[in-house]
Image (tube, rainbow, N blue to C red):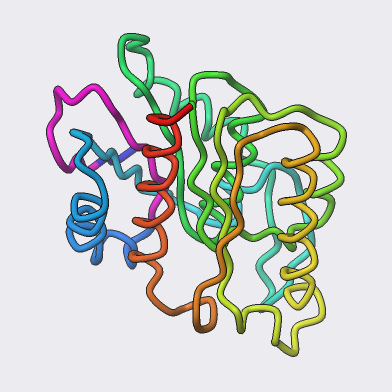
Amino acid sequence: MITTTYGHQDAPIVLIQMVDDHDLEGMEAEVAEIQSLTDADFCLIAIKVHNWNADLSPWTAPAVFGDESFGNGAAHTLTEVLQYVSDRRKTYYIGGYSLSGLFALWAAYQTDVFKGVAAASPSAWFPGFTDYMKEHAIHAESVYLSLGDKEEKTRNPVMATVGDRIREASEVLKSQKVNTILEWNQGNHFKDAGIRTAKAFAWVMQARAVL
């Protein structure tokens, strides 16, 4: 995997984010925004994803736009990610935007290494995911969820369920006594992705401080 590191490499807090080329273009601004929202010393490791739909999907699902379906490569991807979070003296958080946010949520069900999940506009519409949440216990202490207030107003019938699913996900986590918040941002899915992700990371870092 190709990684890019931001912040201080020796920091006690490490943020993990799966990214694509578009994300990387805005990473410095995202890191600056996190720094403006928290005083915590952190290192952010951005991990480049080769095949977005395949590498971040927990299980197969049919295409919802275009003709590219979703694979089941998340387990393999997580195995590689775990190589970067092996120092148990540090505190790790995982987060991301869109399908990367969904992967972050799923990853926290597989391992207890991540203390918080920063899921900004995650792909909560992903078939079967909220059912999976109901049947399993997440290992993270805190989970941040967000969505743009126009994201569910789409003609795509699958993606239009994202509002109902993110509300459902929030209620599932609350019923399981997980420290969580669901924040609504202005705009559609493509607005301010880096800023939204920065807010997500800052929240889980601060939530850890007050637990």
x, y percentage for residue 98?
54, 61
**Closest to the observer: 184 or 103?**
184
Q: Which residues are magenta?
A: 4-19
x, y percentage for residue 153?
70, 86
Residue 47, by quadrant, is top left
Q: Residue at x 39, y 44 (%)?
A: 17
Please say if 135 is above or below 121: above
Left or right position of 53 against 163: left
Q: Residue at x 48, y 27 (%)?
A: 211
Please say if 48 is above or below 178: below
x, y percentage for residue 127?
81, 57
**Closest to the observer: 5 or 204?**
204
Please say if 208 is above or below 57: above
Toward the bottom, the furthest residue is 155
In the rendered structure, does residue 110 fall within the stretch colored magenta?
A: no
Left or right position of 44 against 151: left
Residue 43, by quadrant, is top left
Q: Residue at x 82, y 80 (%)?
A: 157
**Closest to the observer: 154 or 147?**
147
Residue 204, by quadrant, is top left
Image quadrant holding the N terminus, namely top left
x, y percentage for residue 94?
45, 38
Left or right position of 5 against 92: left
Q: Residue at x 73, y 41 (%)?
A: 173
Left or right position of 59 against 120: right
Mark count: 0
Q: Main secondary structure of the magenta part?
A: strand
